[in-house]
Amino acid sequence: MHYEGSFDVKATKEKVYDFVTDPKKVTTIFPDVQSVKVIDANNFSLKAKVGMSFIRGTLDVKLTLVDNKRPTFSKLKARGTGLNSSVDLESSFTLSDAPGGGAHVSWAADAKISGMMASVGSRLIDSAADKYVKQIIGSLEKKLA
């Protein structure tokens, strides 16, 4: 599944970059996070409650910042396991100056789901993934406002 979009915020691209590359800050935009463990500046993990249809439970997610070019680009890779399923996610943020000041944030995310969660059907997965992506990006926009 592929998702992408963009938005403008009043914050500078440096401030946006600092937010999306700080494990303690960026994890605040994910819904239903129960705990966060920072391993080092580029590696962290979290536990989050997830659910779609009749499948509900906790996902253990390991995240790594893999390609950072301050203050214009950041890429994050994540692997979540739980509920007899796995989720592989790669997301990136490209930052530039917005025409009216602040930052223009372009983002992209690619997700691959396997296991029991994938067995519920692509329509249900697409709907649930779309909901999570909108929550995360909406939360990011609010935090940077």
Image (cartoon, rainbow, N blue to C red):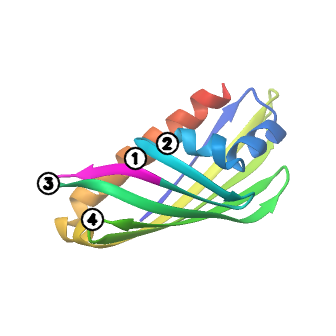
- Which residue, given by chain and number where applicable, does mark 3 sit on? 54
Which sits earlier in the primary sequence, circle 2 or circle 3? 3
Q: Given the image, on which type of amino acid does mark 4 rest?
A: Leu
What residue do we see at 62% from left, 29% from top? 143
Q: Residues within 10 Å of mark 3 (few under 14, many from 20)?
A: few
- Which residue, given by chain and number where applicable, does mark 4 sit on? 83
Q: Cα distance, mark 2 to mark 3? A: 22 Å
Q: Given the image, on which type of amino acid does mark 2 rest?
A: Ile
Q: Secondary structure at mark 3?
A: loop
Q: Cα distance, mark 4 to mark 1? A: 17 Å
In the image, taking residue 12 as reference, residue 42 lies left or right, namely: left
What residue do we see at 58% from left, 62% from top? 63
| Tag 4 and tag 2, C-beta contact below 8 Å | no
Q: Does residue 50 sit above or below 64 in this rendering?
A: above
Residue 136's mark?
2
Q: Given the image, on which type of amino acid does mark 3 rest?
A: Phe
Residue 62's mark?
none
- Which residue, given by chain and number where applicable, does mark 1 sit on? 132
What residue do we see at 79% from left, 30% from top? 102
Q: Secondary structure at mark 2?
A: helix
